[in-house]
Image (cartoon, grey):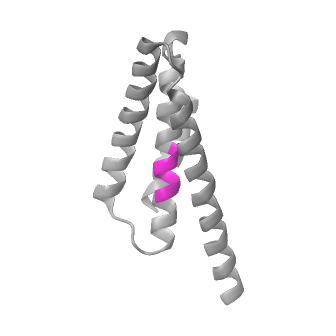
Amino acid sequence: MIPTIGILIGVILGFIFDINVPERFSPYMSVAILACLDSVFGAIRANMSKNFKVDIFISGFFGNALLAAGLAYLGDKLGIPIYIAAVIVFGGRIFDNFAIIRRLILERIKSK
């Protein structure tokens, strides 16, 4: 429930405030947002599995975002597109979590 409320608040704030990210920061922001989405989908999955813990969600949310942005920055300084690794890993985890969420929803529907 908490992740869903957070998403709704974030979407509403995104529509209210017009925030423009400079183009030079877009690679860092994109992988950071992808990492945050991974944490949100993981939190939804954990909540549906009845083992959601706020401290794990918060630390993962900010930790993943900082790590992903840091990797993108390091790769940029080295001239190596390291951010692609973050995109692949977080993208795969998002799809895995979504598949589990979908199965949990279908199981709940079938059991009713």
On the question of residue 96 being in view, the answer is yes
Q: Is residue 72 left or right of residue 54?
A: right
* Left or right: residue 28 compared with residue 104: left
Question: 74 or 98, which is in the foreground?
Answer: 74
Of the 4 image quadrants, the one containing the C terminus is bottom right
Q: Closer to the camera, 35 or 50? A: 35
Q: In this view, which residue lies farthest toward the bottom?
A: 111
| Magenta highlight on residue 41 | yes
Residue 15 among those drawn in magenta: no
Instruction: Give residue 64's quadrant in the image.
Output: top left
From the viewer's perspective, is residue 2 above or below residue 34?
Answer: below
Left or right of residue 44: residue 52? left
| Residue 27 vertical placement versus 32 (above, below) | above
Find residue 17 and report its horizontal and vertical position in percent: 51, 25
Task: Please say whether residue 112 is visible from this viewpoint.
Answer: no
Number of numbered tags placed on the structure image: 0
Q: Main secondary structure of the magenta part?
A: helix
Residue found 36% across the figure and 54% down from its top: 57
Q: Position of residue 40 (x, y in %)?
A: 48, 51
Q: Is residue 15 above or below residue 99?
A: above
Does residue 16 appear to the left or right of 63 in the view shown? right
Look at the image and give the residue range highlighted in magenta. Answer: 37-42
Q: Residue at x 55, y 39 (%)?
A: 11
Instruction: Return the residue nearer the eye: 71 or 108.
Output: 71
From what the image shows, is residue 31 above or below residue 103? Answer: above
x%, y% of residue 5? 48, 53
Q: Residue at x 53, y 44 (%)?
A: 90
Q: Position of residue 50 (x, y in %)?
A: 43, 75
